Image (cartoon, rainbow, N blue to C red):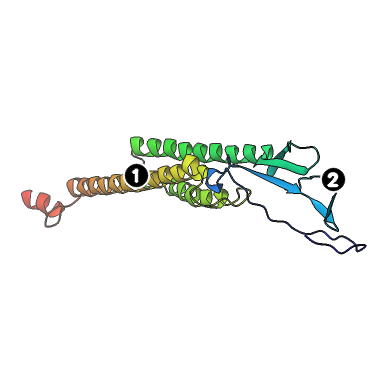
Amino acid sequence: MSFRAHERLTAKDVKVVMTGGSIGDYPFDAYETDIGFWAQMDGKEVPVRLMLSNNDTLFSVSVVPGPSPQEAALGLELVRSGSLLVFAVLMMVVMWALAASVLIGTWYLTSRGEGLVWPALGWMAATLFALSAFRNTAPGSPPIGCVLDWFAFLWAETVIALCVIAVVLTGVRTALRTDGDKTDGEETDGEPDGGTGDLGRASTQ
C-alpha cells in the first residue's frame, strides 16, 4: 500500500493466505497465517503500531506476537467461535434424535402390524425433508460433505428414508392381508356366487 505524504489515510482491504485447515472440517476447522507491516518514508523505515480487532462472529482469533519487537508482525490462528461450535454440535444431536424417533416409530408400526397409518407416514416424510432445511441453517453456509454431514446429516437422512420405505411396505402387506381376510369371511358367511340361499332351504322342505 502506498500513500502520498500529508494526505488522509483511507482503510484498504488486504488479502492474506490462510493455511492449515479446510472448510470440509466444519465445524472443527482451524486456520493460521502470519502477517506483518513495515512502513517506509523517503526510503527509511518508520515505527508502526499494529492493532487487531475481530469483527467476525463465526471465528475466534488468537494472536502470537512476532519474534522481533521492532517489527509489526504477528501470527494469527482462527478457530470457530464457541457459540458456533455449540450450535453445530446441537444440530448434530438433534438430527440423530429425530432419526432415532422415526426409527422407534417404525419399529412400533411394523411390529404391531398397524397397516398404513397416514399421520405417522406424514410425520416421517415431513421429518425427512425438514432435515434438509434444518441443515442449511448451519451458520457459515458449510459445503456439502463436511464433518457435519458425515457425522449426522447424511446418516440421519438415510435412516429416516429407509424407515419410511419399511413402514410403507409393511403397511401395504398388512392392508392387503386384512382385505383378503375380509373377502374370505364374506364368502364363507354370506351367499357365495351361484349358491341357492333361502331357495335351497325351501326346496328341501
Q: Is residue 58 visible?
A: no
Q: Which residue is mark 1?
A: 166
Q: Residues within 10 Å of mark 2 (few under 14, many from 20)?
A: few
The answer to whether 42 is drawn above or below residue 27 in the figure is below
Q: Is residue 5 visible?
A: yes
Return the residue nearer the eye: 30 or 159.
30
- Single out the residue that lies furthest toward the right: 6
- Single out the residue that lies furthest toward the front: 43
- Single out the residue that lies furthest toward the left: 204
* Mark 2 residue element: loop
Whether residue 137 sits left or right of residue 146 in the image: it is right
Residue 178, x across and y down, in percent: 28, 45
For badge 2, the amino acid type reads Arg
Whether residue 62 sits left or right of residue 171 in the image: it is right
Return the residue nearer the eye: 145 or 128.
145
Q: Residues within 10 Å of mark 1 (few under 14, many from 20)?
A: some
CA gap between label 2 and label 1 equals: 66 Å
Return the residue nearer the eye: 204 or 9.
9
Disc number at residue 176? none
* Mark 1 residue element: helix
Q: Which residue is mark 2?
A: 49
Whether residue 22 sits left or right of residue 35 in the image: it is left
For badge 1, the amino acid type reads Ala
